[in-house]
């Protein structure tokens, strides 16, 4: 739902959700009380992926630092279930290590971008007027430049560390949650319980932190789930283009980029396992996000 | 209506000014500033100072910004010291090629997605709908670069039907003389756009089908195909107009990745190679052009929507 996803998917899915009513009848959004099957599948895949990446290396020991050219480009077989790459690194082991950075950075970006976006949007919506106008124009400006272009400019000057990647990716991802929360904040500030705070002498900070933000929590959780998927995807693109974590760090995008040089040699094991893994993990987060949205009855505008 | 248009126009101008500020600040907050970027990492402080004096870079930042905007307004996007050619000249060659690639893919995707989306809406929740929804969801979840690699692996490396590299040439005319080599990049972009558009179209057609005017059309005895082709189609097409405006940043992003993978000589590839060689003036020039195109696209889409759908009233 943000920097790298297709435009306005929220609008499409909102219509799809509303469509559960029979033809022509009054459209009623059916509130689900249990998480959908796809949501369970998504969650299971995410848990499995985390186990694979973080527990896997403890059970399946491989050397991902020192190259072994004598064992390069081996087909899947004994000792190397998914073969090796051109440096002799075991692919299965590298998938695990590469996944660690993807999942860590994806989760960190989702948390950081959502936090910044929520605070920004809540303040803008609560303050209204000129403050709101200025804050939201800043959001518009950053959204007007496709994120990948800004990312490449920023990545040109420095070979990024994990922390820098998280900050830069978050900087380009907080605009969507801020818009969503601002919208809710605009309506919430007119509600009695928020006005009561001010009547009783509570400050604006209290109104925003204690009353407005907690009431947008559903939107926040759903959006954060989509943010993880987007961050993993754009991180893979960056690494694929050679602007991600520098070597010797293992990354999924870097593995694909490496393997793509050998497409015509027929080394399928260097691109298919990692490509399929990226797709599955991204789909899993999207499934979970969709399921949470239905469960929490959130309309992402 | 006039008020609305004026407001939208003003808003677009504000956003574009904001973009120029961002790009300007980026150029000046690079390590060592523009002088370092142009003269290289080994430049001495003396030569950097001389460079700054010569190009007015020792003026206060606001003055420099106004000079920069003045240059932009005269159509001067900067100069590539690495390639020794103006950014304008580079873009005048490469931009048409990118617009062609993105434009033709968008067009083909819309032509395929519109009837399919409507068919899905009519046969909602049947086998056909579920099957097509599955296909579009799968395509929708595919990262662009992964789909492109699949295309190359299957259609080029294994089946050897199409070449893996896009046609080469400095002008658009040279590029389109080799349609066979264009197939893979265009096909990849079409598939990705199709996934988005058919979902959009299905949702939009389902909404149209539930409207009262469809009931009226049916109850006055209009045959079903006429209901679909003259009422559902026309009303569901409206969102496609907005879609073009909204998809522009996404189209450029996908375009960049595809141009890089298929070595298609457009602005995306130019941007990528400039990023690799740290050619900042080119990167920032392209960024400005793309941002302005995006903002203009959104503005046009909003105006077109307001003109096409008189039900919409803006405050």
Image: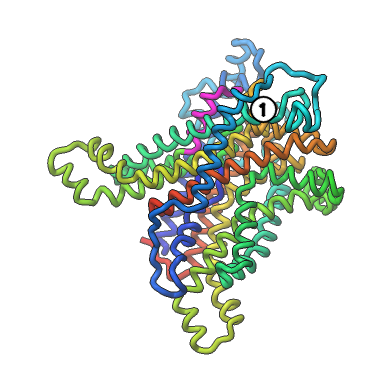
**A169 inside magenta stretch:** yes
- The location of residue A183, given as percent across then percent down, is 36, 49
Q: Is residue A48 left or right of residue B13?
A: right
Residue A98 percent location from the top left of the image: 62, 29
Residue at 34 percent across and 45 percent down: it is A216
What residue is shown at x 51% (from left), y 69% (from top)? B206
Task: Check the image and report above or below for B44 versus B26.
Answer: above
Q: Residue furthest left?
A: A200
Dot 1: what SS? helix
Q: Which residue carries the number 1 mark?
A: A94
**Picture quarter containing residue B190?**
bottom right
- Let me know if residue A57 is in the magenta part: no
Q: Which stretch is magenta?
A: A158-173
The answer to whether residue A178 is left or right of residue A12 is left
Q: Chain of mark 1?
A: A
Residue A143 coordinates in the image, percent (x, y): 50, 43
């Amino acid at each position: 739902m943000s920097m790298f996803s297709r435009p306005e998917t929220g609008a499409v899915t909102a219509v799809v959700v509303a469509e559960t009513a029979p033809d022509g009848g009054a459209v009623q959004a059916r509130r689900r009380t249990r998480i959908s099957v796809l949501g369970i599948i998504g969650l299971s895949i995410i848990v499995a992926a985390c186990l694979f990446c973080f527990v896997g290396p403890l059970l399946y020991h491989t050397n991902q630092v020192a190259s072994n050219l004598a064992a390069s480009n081996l087909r899947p077989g004994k000792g190397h279930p998914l073969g090796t790459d051109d440096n002799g690194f075991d692919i299965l082991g590298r998938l695990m290590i590469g996944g660690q950075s993807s999942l860590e950075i994806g989760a960190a970006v989702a948390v950081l971008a959502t936090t910044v976006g929520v605070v920004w949007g809540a303040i803008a919506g609560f303050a209204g007027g000129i403050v709101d106008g200025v804050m939201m124009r800043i959001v518009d400006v950053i959204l007007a430049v496709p994120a990948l272009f800004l990312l490449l400019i920023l990545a040109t000057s420095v070979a990024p560390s994990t922390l820098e990647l998280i900050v830069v990716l978050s900087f380009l991802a907080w605009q969507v949650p801020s818009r969503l929360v601002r919208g809710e904040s605009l309506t919430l500030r007119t509600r009695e319980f928020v006005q009561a705070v001010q009547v009783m002498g509570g400050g604006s900070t209290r109104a925003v932190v204690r009353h407005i933000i907690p009431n947008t929590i559903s939107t926040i959780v759903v959006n954060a789930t989509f943010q993880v998927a987007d961050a993993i995807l754009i991180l893979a693109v960056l690494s694929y283009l050679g602007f991600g974590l520098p070597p010797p760090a293992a990354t999924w995008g870097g593995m694909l980029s490496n393997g793509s040089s050998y497409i015509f040699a027929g080394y399928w094991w260097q691109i298919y396992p990692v490509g399929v893994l990226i797709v599955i993990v991204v789909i899993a987060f999207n499934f979970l996000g969709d399921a949470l949205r239905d469960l929490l009855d959130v309309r992402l505008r | 209506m006039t008020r609305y248009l004026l407001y939208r126009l003003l808003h677009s101008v504000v956003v574009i000014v904001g973009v120029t500020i961002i790009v300007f600040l980026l150029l000046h907050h690079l390590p060592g500033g523009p002088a370092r970027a142009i003269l290289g990492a080994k430049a001495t402080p003396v030569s950097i100072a001389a460079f700054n004096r010569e190009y007015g870079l020792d003026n206060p930042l606001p003055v420099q910004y106004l000079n920069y905007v003045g240059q932009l307004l005269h159509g001067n996007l900067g100069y590539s010291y690495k390639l020794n050619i103006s950014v304008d000249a580079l873009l005048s060659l490469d931009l048409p090629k990118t617009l062609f690639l993105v434009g033709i893919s968008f067009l083909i995707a819309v032509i395929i997605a519109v009837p399919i989306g409507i068919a899905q809406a009519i046969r909602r929740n049947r086998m056909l709908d579920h099957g097509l929804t599955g296909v579009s969801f799968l395509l929708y979840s595919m990262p662009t670069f992964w789909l492109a690699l699949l295309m190359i692996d299957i259609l080029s490396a294994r089946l050897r039907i199409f070449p893996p590299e896009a046609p080469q040439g400095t002008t658009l005319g040279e590029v389109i003389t080799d349609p066979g080599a264009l197939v893979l990049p265009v096909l990849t972009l079409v598939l990705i756009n199709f996934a988005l558009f058919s979902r959009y179209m299905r949702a939009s057609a389902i909404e149209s089908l539930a409207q009262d005017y469809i009931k009226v059309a049916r109850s006055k005895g209009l045959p079903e195909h006429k209901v679909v082709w003259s009422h559902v189609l026309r009303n569901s097409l409206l969102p496609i107009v907005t879609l073009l405006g909204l998809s522009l940043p996404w189209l450029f992003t996908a375009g960049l990745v595809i141009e890089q993978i298929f070595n298609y000589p457009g602005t995306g590839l130019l941007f990528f190679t400039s990023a690799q060689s740290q050619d900042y003036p080119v990167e920032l020039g392209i960024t400005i052009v793309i941002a302005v195109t995006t903002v203009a696209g959104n503005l046009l889409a909003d105006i077109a929507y307001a003109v096409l759908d008189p039900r919409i009233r803006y405050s």
